[in-house]
Amino acid sequence: MNTIRHRYFIVHKPHSMLSQFIGTDKGRMLGELNYPFPEGTHAIGRLDYESEGLLLLTTNKKVTRLLFQGEVPHKRSYLVQVRGIVTEETLLQLQSGIAIRVKGGVDYTTAPCQVQLAQAPQGLPELPHDLNPYVKSSWLRIVLTEGKFHQVRKMVRSVNHRCLRLVRVAIEDIDLDLQNQPPGTVREIEESAFFSQLCINNW
């Protein structure tokens, strides 16, 4: 009996692209990336249309359950540009947990997480709507172990900072090399390395 060989991909999703191959929504999709993905490839944990960065793809349908629906939480790291200067008081608010509105109009207090000021990342292209250089902004690095719908955007909005750019840079130990893997590029990774870096055992 032949064992199915699943495949695993690290994608740098560009801004203004959907995290899917087919759908009714208008906009660019993953099929427009210049890569011969095998049949059955799908995204694990999507990024919304305006978000960028690390997107994992695989032909293995079990991975989403193992990674995002299991009992062990997994870290997701983001670089976030917000309008205005973020104070130490605001950092503490975000770190300690903050109320956001989730599905169904319910208020939800986020779990404590890691939030710190960060340098602007190197290797990202400018966007057409990038800020006037005279408008002040701050970059944050936020590390979460939960993922409510649009959570990061809602968190910074709750402390009166508008999210200007959201880049996922890591899931557990799989890091996106922004300088060497530009938007729209794909890198395949071996199964053993994939699960090891995601800290998933017994797969």
Image: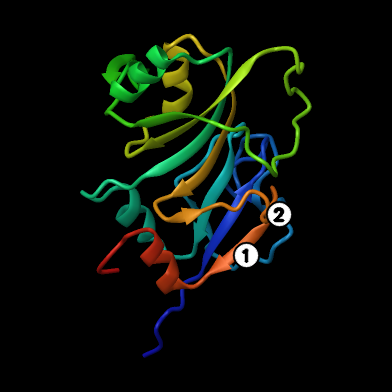
Q: Which residue is labeled 1 in the image? A: 37
Question: x, y (%) of residue 2?
Answer: 41, 88
Question: x, y (%) of residue 44?
Answer: 45, 51
Q: Which residue is labeled 2 in the image? A: 33
Between residue 31 and residue 133, name the one nearer to us: 133
Q: Residues within 10 Å of mark 1 (few under 14, many from 20)?
A: some
Q: Amino acid at mark 1?
A: Phe
Instruction: Please say whether residue 111 is visible from this viewpoint.
Output: yes
Q: Amino acid at mark 2?
A: Leu
**Quadrant of the image containing the N terminus:** bottom left
Instruction: Please say whether residue 19 is visible from this viewpoint.
Output: no
Residue visible at 69% across and 47% down in the picture: 183
| Residue 146 appears left or right of 121 | left
Asked which quadrant contains residue 26, the reply is top right
Question: x, y (%) of residue 98?
Answer: 32, 17
Asked which quadrant contains residue 23, the reply is top right
**Quadrant of the image containing the C terminus:** bottom left
Between residue 202 and residue 32, name the one nearer to us: 202
Asked which quadrant contains residue 110, the reply is top left
Residue visible at 54% across and 29% down in the picture: 80
- SS at mark 1 in the image: loop
Residue 84 vertical position relative to residue 47 in the rendered view, above or below:
above
Q: Which residue extends farthest top? A: 160
What separation in Å lies between label 2 and label 1 (alpha carbons)? Answer: 9 Å
Q: Residues within 10 Å of mark 2 (few under 14, many from 20)?
A: some
Marks 1 and 2: in contact by CB < 8 Å? yes
* Residue 133 tag number: none
Residue visible at 72% across and 51% down in the picture: 32
